[in-house]
Image (tube, rainbow, N blue to C red):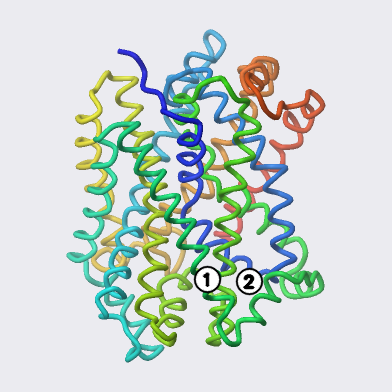
Amino acid sequence: MERERLSSRLGFILLSAGCAIGLGNVWRFPYITGRYGGAAFVLMYLLFLVFMGVPVMIMEFAIGRAGRMNIVGALKKLEPASSKWHGVGYVAVAGNYLLLMYYSVITGWLLYYFYSFLSGRLNASFTTEAVGTYFSTLTAAPGLQIVLTALALLLTAGIVIIGLKNGVEKITKVMMVILFILMFILAIHSCLLPGGKEGILFYMKPDFGNLVHEYGLGESVFAAMGQAFFTLSLGIGAMAIFGSYFDRKRTLGGESIRIICLDTTVALLSGFIIFPACSAFGVEAGSGPSLLFISLPNVFTQMTMGGIWGAVFFLAMIFAALSTLIAVFENICAYWMDMKGWPRKKAAVVNFILLFVLSLPAVLGYNVLSFIQPIGSGSTILDGEDFLVSNIILPLGSLAYVIFCTHRYGWGWDKFTAEANQGEGFKIPNALRIYCAWILPLIIAFICVNGIVGVFA
């Protein structure tokens, strides 16, 4: 059976950007930036994005395009005889399942908040305490969360069943265009709010003294490295699958830079939405994970026409989350289609049922199973799953790809660059070989170790 291909270069760029663009851009980036000093942190983040994100993304794309299969099949095809590099692929596939097991739950929450603002259930009559109670009431209701999670997975599976071109590519392209439009509108509205100027200055005027004295330069640098690395969803083969659908008319370096620019644009826009709004209404932007479901709803309930603006914001968040769900679900289905010969519909239906069952622990971790605290007091099953993906599987997967693409006992630098540099566009210079082969792996290993130690310290 002939392998499916994407219909256009734009489809490849927007699909890959959609996979990278997720809650890490519009949720984690603003609160991390708020915590570590604003503009100075943003500058460090952008620097690490270039030196770390670009090369790892090129490598993952190259493995996929050269192998023309999912990450397991591609590594099997490219690895030296008698080596076991494809074992990394099985870990990557497991990472895809783990990611969707909790990401679908969070997407369900987004659907609920979109409905709540659109219907007027969440409105100006809510006090600060009532907004906090609204979220805790949601997480305490397993039945409601199960329905919302099923809806998120059903939307995802339905789009993937339609097909690569007519479903995954076409619908993701539309969602990405609408996402950018909505975020530009929200950013302009926030920047024009009375009292928003201080938030803009905090976001745009670097203050390295604040960054160094508040948390220390070392912790701030590590936070910037971690955010630059994790925001791109690298390490689980989700980018490799889109590389396998892409032609060889363009180099992978040029396309990776474009995708990362789109990803970064969304992250930066989210700051222009959140910092002026938080400044205008006296809400702490560095308030941590509660920013999305407690702090920002408090902003919208105080805002003129807050119900409309809240609904628009959470619709944008739904598109950001769904684009990642669709990309990762496509990667899972591609594994079963490539390796087991399953038709697309069977792969999607079976994995919809499987993921629905696997997502239940994350739902129940906030209520029935709240006594299970896998990474310390107060943590939930969802936190534990996120820790496994973000702190272990993503960095270790990326580390494996870097070593595989740069050393002779893997695929090797020459074969990697030959694939990555095919076509028109930016070509990887040979001068980067030492950096990619020796320095980049050390940086990724450092991030991984610090991420694990930081949780249990």
Compared across the picture, whether 292 is left or right of 356 comes to right
Q: Residue at x 52, y 9 (%)?
A: 82
Is 33 in front, or is 391? 33
Is 334 in front, or is 356? 334
Q: Residue at x 38, y 45 (%)?
A: 98
* Above or below 437: residue 283: below
Q: Residue at x 74, y 59 (%)?
A: 43
Image location (x, y in percent) of residue 149: 25, 56
Query: Would you identify the image quadrant in which residue 138 lies?
Result: bottom left
Counting residues from the N terminus, which is met first, the one under dot 1 or under dot 2? 2
Identify the amino acid type marked 2: Arg
Mark number displayed over residue 411 = none
Compared across the picture, whether 111 is left or right of 229 comes to left
- As helix, strand or loop, the secondary structure at mark 1 comes to helix
On the image, numbered disc 1 is attached to which residue? 288
Compared across the picture, whether 218 is left or right of 361 comes to right
Query: Would you identify the image quadrant in which residue 367 lies?
Result: bottom left
Image location (x, y in percent) of residue 430: 78, 23
Image location (x, y in percent) of residue 334: 35, 28
**Mark pair 1, 2: CA separation:** 8 Å
Is 3 in front, or is 78? 3
Compared across the picture, whether 342 is left or right of 170 comes to left
Circles 1 and 2, Cβ within 8 Å, touching? The answer is yes
Identify the amino acid type marked 1: Gly
Q: Quadrant of the N terminus?
A: top left
Tell how many labels: 2
Q: Quadrant of the C terminus?
A: bottom right
Q: Residue at x 61, y 55 (%)?
A: 227
Mark number displayed over residue 35 = 2
- As helix, strand or loop, the secondary structure at mark 2 comes to helix
Disc 2: CA contacts within 10 A as few (<14), some (14-19) or many (>=20): many
* Above or below 280: residue 3: above
